[in-house]
Amino acid sequence: MVFVAGLIASKMANHSGIEHFKNSMILNNNKKIQYKDYYNSVMNSSLNFIFLCIVLIINIVPALLIAYHCTKNTTNKLFNMSVAILFSDFYIFYYAIRRFVYKDERFCN
């Protein structure tokens, strides 16, 4: 879910960047690719990728730590950690509701 949201956000922030990058990479014998255009395209895609990685790390790592810490046996740890990777925002929301709203003392001691 976070990955999809990150891709949508990067597409909304730079909607013409992908088309410009794709058009600039088409090799045409009559048109020479300028170094400045190539550098700008590579820098733009690199920055978008780094931003997406940072957003993923900030969202997924806490969910993985909660899933690892709050699960007792190994098979459930693997299942809960895979759910935490796929649905990290929902997993953290579930943890917060169960821990702080319901005040379930048996959950994640």
Image (cartoon, grey):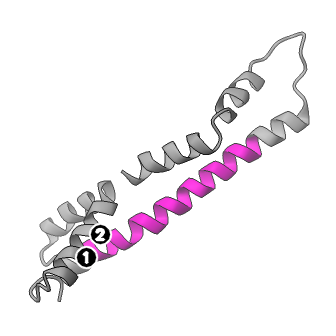
Residue 50 location, quadrant: bottom right
Along the line of sight, which residue is nearer the eye, 47 or 71?
47
Residue drawn at point x = 13 percent, y = 67 percent: 76
Q: Residue 4, percent across and down?
A: 42, 45
Q: Residue 55, percent across and down?
A: 51, 61
Q: Residue 16, percent across and down?
A: 67, 32
- Which structural element holds mark 1? helix
Residue, far top: 30
Identify the residue position indicated by label 2 in the image: 92
Say if 2 sits above or below 59 in the image: above
Residue drawn at point x = 83 percent, y = 41 percent: 39
Count of numbered badges drawn on the protein: 2
Along the line of sight, which residue is nearer the eye, 77 or 40?
40
Identify the residue position indicated by label 1 in the image: 96
| Magenta part of the chain | 42-67
Residue drawn at point x = 68 percent, y = 49 percent: 46
